[in-house]
Amino acid sequence: MSSSEVSYLSSPEFYSLSLYILGCIAFPIHLFGAWCILVETPETMKRVKWAMFNLHSWGCSLDLLLGILGQPFIVPPVFGGAPLGLLHLFGVDPGIQVYLMVTLMNMVAISTGAIFENRFYILFAEKTWWRYVRYPYYITNVALAFLYYVPTMIDIPDQTLAREWIFEHHPEVKRFDSPDHPIYVVAYNVPDPDWIRVRMIISVTIMVTESLTFFFLLRWQMKKATKLMTMSEKTLAAQKAFLKAINMQIAIPASVIGTPQILLIFIGYFGWNTSELNSFAYVVMSIHGASATLVMLYCHHAYREYCKGLLRGKLSGLKTLNRWSPFVSVTSSDRHRGVQ
């Protein structure tokens, strides 16, 4: 790929470098967040601990795939792209990489809804019919997440024929093709791309609806408990503070990953998307997990105090080092005593 064909800022090389840098910055943030959840979660948050760790794990896995392992470089208007990450260097089939990316996105969405469902169940539905239904509900959701992309994988075309077709009908994308990173075509025959988009819209709609359902059920039940005084004021205050933190923890990262996804789905119908726009969207999505971790550490009181304690310890250590000097000052009285 020559520089005359595409600018460096629009090139796969710049896109890959940006993702590697962001991925290396995000990885220690993920590890620290996991440590805080596993070790520093207080007893009052014990019953939501594993739901939070589940969301954290899937979000970090998605970050790792987008930022370091997969790095999908999408080349519209073709329904495909070139994998640039470590998995491609290790010879992993691009179709497998796309399947992993889509499945992880679905699992992040399911885990987000699970946070609200967990709170709803513990506070208001533990002794209702929902305790029997929630397990089939989760099994169905996870099965759909892992099976959702299977029809697309089954219909992936012969790459030789598909590449010949896209280069003939869309010669402008050939500039992004190279022997090291050949363009992988997911679909090119109408109506295959349209059906993939329809399935994406249906999947996103279902998962957003589930999360919003439990979110509003939780708010409604909290207001109801306040009016009927079925909970103590202290318990209600603690639950409201926790829910406020959870809302922030989910809303900000959800906008980071959800907004680019939704925009890419709809602008694809109008043919407005470009390789630069897609690259920017995936760079933004690659920091979803890290942003979720930072928001979690700030919003939850226990984790915030733990971080403050670490910072205070570091600052006091630096002050101690500043007070210590490796040089011995020699005073006039020392000279009289023969100190050199």
Image (cartoon, rainbow, N blue to C red):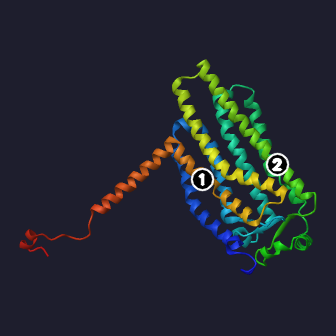
Left or right of 271? Residue 46 is left
- Inspect this view and state whether residue 112 appears: yes
Question: 234 or 18: which is nearer to us?
Answer: 18
Q: Which quadrant holds residue 61?
A: bottom right
Q: Secondary structure at mark 1?
A: helix
Which quadrant is the N terminus positioned in?
A: bottom right
- Inspect this view and state whether residue 92 appears: no
Residue, x 63% and y 27% (percent of image)? 222
Indicate the position of residue 84 as horizontal and vertical percent values. 72, 70
Residue position marked by numbered label 1 in the rendering = 291
Q: Which mark is residue 201?
A: 2
The amino acid marked with disc number 2 is: Ile
Q: Which mark is residue 137?
A: none
Indicate the position of residue 305 as horizontal and vertical percent values. 46, 44
Q: How many marks?
A: 2
Q: Secondary structure at mark 2?
A: helix
Residue, x 93% and y 62% (percent of image)? 189
